[in-house]
Amino acid sequence: MENNLFKHSANRLEAHLGKDAHKFTKEDIKQVVSDLNIRMVNFMYPAGDGRLKTLNFMLHTPEYLETILTNGERVDGSSLFSFIAAASSDLYVMPRFSTAFVDPFSEIPTLCMLCSFFDRDGNPLASSPEYTLHKAMAAFRKVTGMEFHAMGELEYYVIRDDEGVFPADDQHGYHESSPFAKSNDFRMRAMQLIAECGGKIKYGHSEVGNFVENGRCYEQNEIEFLPVAANECAEQLLLAKWIIRSLGYEEGLDVTFAPKITVGKAGSGMHIHMRIMKDGKNMMLDHGKLSVDARRAIAGMMDLAESITAFGNKNPTSYFRLVPHQEAPTNVCWGMSNRSVLVRVPLGWTSGEDMCHKANETEPLTARDYSGKQTVEMRSPDASADIYQLLAGLCVACRHGFEMANAEAEAERTFADGDIHDPKNAERYATLAQLPDSCAASADCLERQRKVYEEYDVFSPAMIDGIIKQLRAFNDRTLRQEIEGKEMMMEQLVRQYFHCG
């Protein structure tokens, strides 16, 4: 029966094995290696720069496969993370079988798995980003009795030679179809590969940004995922970035997730949607209205918003995106379906109306429960983020909201029900805090609020120290003012961080 349930799964290995990836075992991995004539195994893991690294294993014997699946392998931690000293740098990497996928790009039949880091004593590395998220989720569960789920919106530009036909309207590419959008087929191929490798995709579409410059066509796209446990969300976003870049390279296209692309054009964010779950039920709504629990979580994000940028906005160009009138947040506030706020509560199918029946007269009128779909969306992050650190930081912030004595008052104070950039609302929103305007300012905010992140031993002091040092090294405290009106300097800065994260 289980095989029948999974035979049509987009995930190639779920379909092949006839079971949920969460239940993959070492014996399943061995079976895949045999059945698919796998010749090589890759261990993959993110380093301090946020990118996936790869260790290749040539399979000699069944015994060797057993060894690497059981024991993992040693790696040089000091070359992967700046906060690990060379004198004590050895780490172990151990594969997580649930993340296994067949490499869609390798000519040699290759099986890949994401890995966790362990220290010399065989314990999870306390300061690794992946284990930090694990600890954040555990602390959230301990405090609230609920699970923290997330999903990402991954925006990126595809760049190709301009064909000079069916030009799209500048900065009006949202949901455009071919032939006015030239990158739709590329996006759909990427979506298929991501799904085959285990990604749970909601949808994809062309985005607002499009323009032609120096004979090159720039088209913005977005792939959005379905909500899953936060650790799985991180894995999916990591793999998706790797697949999109690798497919672009294979097809001779340039791809960038950079938060700032050029002056006056839409930048790319990586918005994160969140929900809190208990016994399989979404707790974001109460009788069709935003629940008290949801408002507490939002209050926590409002309280820690300024320091969350230290995890979600990791290079100077991030802060050129966070400016007014660009559908990117600048003020610390939240609202309903309002794209000028930091945390948005998107439409959640709460009307109780059967729209399917109204659009299709042949369908019977049915009472439908859509409460599982409600999320809240953090709009400040971009793809320069360390995805594990970012999700851990958001998880801490939501937990913090449950521990704040004034959570409901803070949620009320920071609620914005109008355009915060409209001059007529200026006095009303004058008391709202502002997001940092540089990496250096984000580092200051993190240093001021670090104790909250270090509670329950979630973020290690070494990791917080490392992030602060990394951000301050950009020396960008006054960069936005210095570079204003200097397009050539801006172009050089964008090019420097063109392939961030």
Image (tube, grey):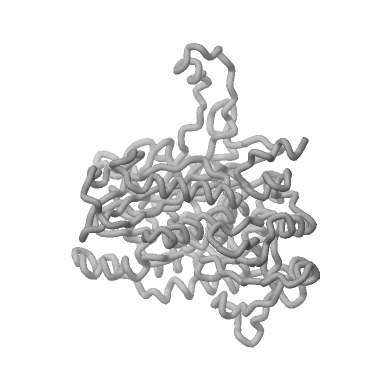
Residue 67, can we see it? yes
Q: Residue at x 65, y 53 (%)?
A: 137
Q: Is residue 471 left or right of residue 391?
A: left
Q: Nearer the viewer, residue 314 or 310?
A: 314
Residue 75 at x, y = what percent?
Answer: 65, 77
Q: Residue furthest bottom?
A: 87
Q: Is residue 454 left or right of residue 390?
A: right
Residue 458 at x, y = what percent?
Answer: 64, 62
Q: Residue at x 42, y 46 (%)?
A: 333
Residue 431, can we see it? no
Q: Quadrant of residue 340?
A: top left
Q: Residue at x 71, y 38 (%)?
A: 279
The N terminus - image quarter:
top right
Number of numbered markers: 0
Above or below residue 459? Residue 382 is above
Above or below residue 254? Residue 371 is above
Q: Quadrant of residue 444?
A: bottom left
Q: Quadrant of residue 293?
A: top right
Residue 198 at x, y = what percent?
Answer: 61, 50
Q: Residue at x 38, y 39 (%)?
A: 338
Q: Is residue 52 left or right of residue 21?
A: left
Q: Nearer the viewer, residue 89 or 67?
A: 67
